[in-house]
Amino acid sequence: MTDALIIKRIAAEDLPTAAPGLTALLLDAVDDGASVGFTASLTAEQAAGWWTSLAPDLTDERVILWAAHDGDRLIGTVQLRCETSPNGRHRAEIAKLLVHRAARGRGTARRLLTTAEEFARTGGRTLLMLDTQTGSAAENLYRTAGWTALGTVSDYAADPSGTLRPTTFFHKALPTPSA
């Protein structure tokens, strides 16, 4: 990790400026085989459209989005997807933790994850959930960051090539914020 790493929250009004970097990041992840909801046929236009479609959720704070920058270059992102049902406001989901493959191995993913966890904790969330492709580098990150595996579902999601892969589901209990 370089000293220039800055993590900042992306609001709906920031999306037009952030969209090119976010688009490049998503395309890189899919091109590298990450099972993040898209297939290899993903185009730059589709990726940009997906990011900009988050604007209403960012405005309503159903989704909180952060981006990691190394200098002027966007190299990573993570989302906190907040549950809004009356019986689930204590929980949220970590989603789309992506780090550009040229920037991996420097602690960026761990910093992004910690940022989302701390935001959730200070916002009163006491339970976080996530899922990731079984056997991926991300699975190891979550295990070493104190997440507990709930189980694995075979053939849960297709990777970018269309091959069905197993997915491991995780949870993490967060301490309540200090009064």
Image (spheres, helix red, strand yellow):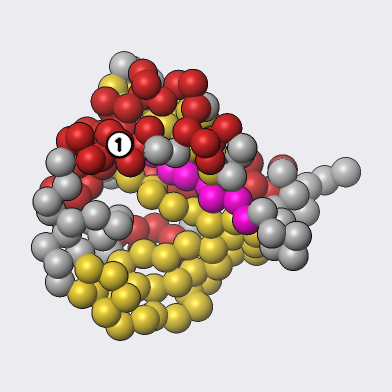
Which quadrant of the figure contains the C terminus?
Answer: top right
Q: Is residue 134 left or right of residue 53?
A: left
Q: Secondary structure at mark 1?
A: helix
Residue shown at the point (52%, 36%) measured from the top left: 56
Name of the residue lying farthest toward the right: 179
Position in image of residue 159 (x %, y %):
20, 64
Q: Is residue 79 magenta?
A: yes
Residue shown at the point (72%, 43%) measured from the top left: 122
Position in image of residue 178 (x %, y %):
82, 45
Nearest to the observer: residue 163 or residue 50: 50
Q: Is residue 172 left or right of residue 7?
A: right
Determine the image quadrant of residue 48.
top left
Q: Is residue 94 above or below residue 115?
A: below
Binning the other alpha carbons within 10 Å of mark 1 as few (below 14), some (14 to 19) or many (20 upward) gives few
Q: Amino acid at mark 1?
A: Gly
Q: Which residues are magenta?
A: 75-83
Position in image of residue 66 (x %, y %):
47, 34
Which quadrant of the figure contains the N terminus?
Answer: top left
Residue shown at the point (57%, 32%) measured from the top left: 59
Q: Is residue 154 left or right of residue 109?
A: left
Predominant secondary structure, magenta span: strand
Determine the image quadrant of residue 63.
top right
Determine the image quadrant of residue 173.
bottom right
Q: Which residue does the numbered mark 1 point to in the structure image?
A: 49
